[in-house]
Structure formats: structure tokens, C-alpha cells
Amino acid sequence: MGHAVMTHAPTQPSEIHPHHLAAPIADQVNELLDQADQYADHHELTASALIHAQVIRLTGIRPPASGELARCTCQACYCSCIFDAAKAHTYLDGTVEFVQCIRCADEHPLTGDE
């Protein structure tokens, strides 16, 4: 009687913290995300999407359905998590928009009125 062998595909993380990456990779990821933000600010969405795809390949993060990543800019803890932008919580502090990842939004939600 034969035995079935099940192999498990490695799972990709849905988020990543740059401090878990090698320093040169983390620096490159941060530079790329800064560039993507600049392109998005100028409504050059194709260029921004291409850079997000580079970050996805570079980090091994699971590609979000939208293809867009966000970086946590939470002022309460500065975690800098990179994750699916569709799951981002945003708040305004004056005229500056900040992003919280799922964990930060659950543990210490900010509204900008603090």
C-alpha cells in the first residue's frame, strides 16, 4: 500500500518589518517605498505600482491583491511595518496623514485628536 506524501509550500508573510531584513536590503526597500510615494503623489501610478512589485520581490512578502503596499508611520511606536495597503488605517495630525498597520490600529488606535 502506498503512502501519500504531502508537501507544504512555504508560506509568504503578509507583512514584514524592515529591521528583520539585512541592513542593505532594508535601506533599499525604504528608498524604493519613498520613490513609490513620490510617484503616487504625482499621480504616476504605473511607476508606483512597478516599484511596489520590486519591493514585493525583494522582501518575499505575499503580494496583496491590489499590488499596493503601505508602510506604518504610527507615531505611537514607529514600527515601520510594510503590509497590504488595503488594510491600512489612516489618520490626520494637522495636515499630515499617517498610516497605522493592523496591529498598531488594534493596540493603540490614533485619530490625530490626541
Image (cartoon, rainbow, N blue to C red):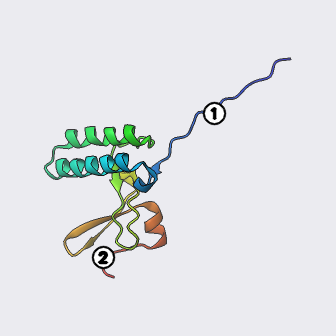
Taking the spot 30% from the left edge, 46% from the top edge, the residue there is 28
Q: Nearer the viewer's eye, disc 1 or disc 2?
A: 1
If the image is split into quadrants, where does the N terminus sit? top right
Q: Is residue 109 above or below residue 9?
A: below
In this view, the residue in front, 96 or 27, is 27
In this view, the residue in front, 20 or 44, is 20
Taking the spot 45% from the left edge, 42% from the top edge, the residue there is 62
Q: Earlier in the sequence, mark 1 or mark 2?
A: 1
10 Å neighbourhood of mark 1: few (<14), some, or many (≥20)?
few
Q: Position of residue 19 (x, y in %)?
A: 42, 56
Q: CA distance from mark 1 to mark 2?
A: 44 Å
Taking the spot 30% from the left edge, 76% from the top edge, the residue there is 112
Taking the spot 16% from the left edge, 43% from the top edge, the residue there is 44
Identity of the amino acid at label 2? Gly
Query: How many numbered marks, from 0 up?
Result: 2
Q: Which residue is mark 1?
A: 8
Q: Which residue is mark 2?
A: 112
Identity of the amino acid at label 1? His
Outermost residue toward the top? 1
Q: Is residue 107 above or below residue 13?
A: below
Q: Residue 56, located in which quarter of the rendered image?
A: top left
Q: Is residue 60 above or below residue 95?
A: above
